[in-house]
Amino acid sequence: MTGKKLTPLGKYISKALTDKDMTKTQLAATVGMSPPYLSYILYGMRSGEKYLPAITAALELDPHKVAKLTAA
C-alpha cells in the first residue's frame, strides 16, 4: 500500500488495535473478512459498511465516533 494514507477511520481503528494488543489479521478473522479487505477499509478503498458494526463491537469503539468518521 505504498503511497496510500490511512483515513481518519483507519487511524482510529489502528490505534484501537494497538490499545487492545491485537493484529489486523486477528481483527479480520474475528469479524469474518480477509486481512487485505480490512486494509482496503483502513485506507479508504472500500467502505466496509457491512463490517463496521462487527469491527466496532470487536474493538469496543465508540459507535458515534465511528459514524462521524465514516460520514466525513
Image (cartoon, helix red, strand yellow):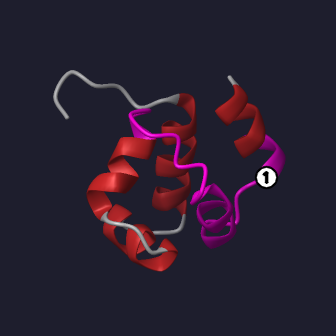
Residue farthest toward the right in the current orientation of the protein: 64
- Tell me the element at label 1: helix
Q: Which percent across, then down, holds residue 13?
A: 53, 49
Is residue 20 on the magenta stretch? Answer: no
Q: Is residue 16 above or below residue 10?
A: below
> In the rendered picture of this protein, how many numbered marks are placed on residues?
1
Q: Quadrant of the C terminus?
A: top right
Q: Where on the picture, by quarter, is residue 46?
A: top left
Disc 1 residue type?
Answer: Pro
Q: Is residue 37 visible?
A: yes
Q: Is residue 51 above or below residue 7?
A: below
Q: Is residue 50 above or below residue 6?
A: below
Q: Where on the picture, by quarter, is residue 42?
A: top left
Q: Which percent across, then down, holds residue 40?
A: 36, 43
Q: Is residue 22 visible?
A: no
Magenta-highlighted residues? 42-65
Q: Which percent across, then down, holds residue 63?
A: 79, 52
| Image point (39%, 77%), residue name | 29
| Image point (40%, 68%), residue name | 33
Q: Which percent across, then down, holds residue 48?
A: 52, 49
Residue farthest toward the left in the current orientation of the protein: 2
Residue under numbered circle 1: 63
Report whether 60 appears left or right of 30: right
| Image point (28%, 25%), residue name | 4
Is residue 52 on the magenta stretch? Answer: yes
Q: Residues within 10 Å of mark 1 (few under 14, many from 20)?
A: some
Q: Quadrant of the N terminus?
A: top left
Residue farthest toward the front in the current orientation of the protein: 50
